[in-house]
Amino acid sequence: QVQLVESGGGLVQPGGSLKLSCAASGRTFSTYAMGWFRQDPGKEREFVASIRWSGNRTYYSDSVKGRFTISRDNAKYTVYLQMNSLRPEDTAVYYCAAAAFGSNTWNYWGQGTQVTVSS
């Protein structure tokens, strides 16, 4: 079992930056692919970014490519999402997710952290 706890959300002005963190429990963290998703009320949850267990491959949605960066520190059991040039449409609850090695689904989810981009 893996528990995920997100932090770092908040209110930021358009054009600003935030860095989200997701702390994971469990010694098997380094074997999990990690991802970030977001959901606005009334909309479906959407993929934002993911990173392989080794950290050598990252993937981004077109809407955040070039503005967001996902990274991980396996020694700290933590994955990050650096968000730059934030836009009002980035406003959402951001969720961290983990996929076990070899799994084709996201097995674990955090509780989410609110990001609001507004002037």
Image (cartoon, rainbow, N blue to C red):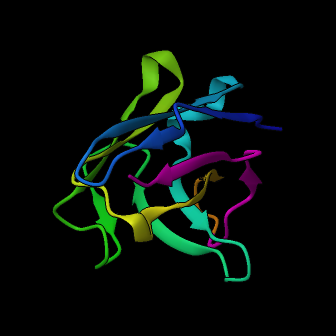
Residue 73 percent coordinates (x, y): 39, 26
The correct choice, above or below, for 109 with respect to 48 in the image is: above
The picture places residue 11, in percent across and down from the top left corner, at: 49, 41
Which residue occupies the extreme left position in the image?
66
Q: 51 or 27: nearer the eye?
A: 51
Quarter location, residue 101? bottom right
Q: Is residue 78 magenta?
A: no
Q: Position of residue 43 (x, y in %)?
A: 67, 83
Q: Quadrant of the N terminus?
A: top right
Q: Residue at x 51, y 61 (%)?
A: 91
Query: Magenta span covers which residues?
Result: 104-119
Q: Is residue 115 magenta?
A: yes
Residue at 34 percent across and 47 percent down: it is 13
Residue at left offset 69%, top offset 47%: 112
**Residue 53 against residue 88 in the figure, above or below:** above
**Is 61 placed left or right of 9 in the picture?**
left
**Is 68 placed above or below 78 here?**
below
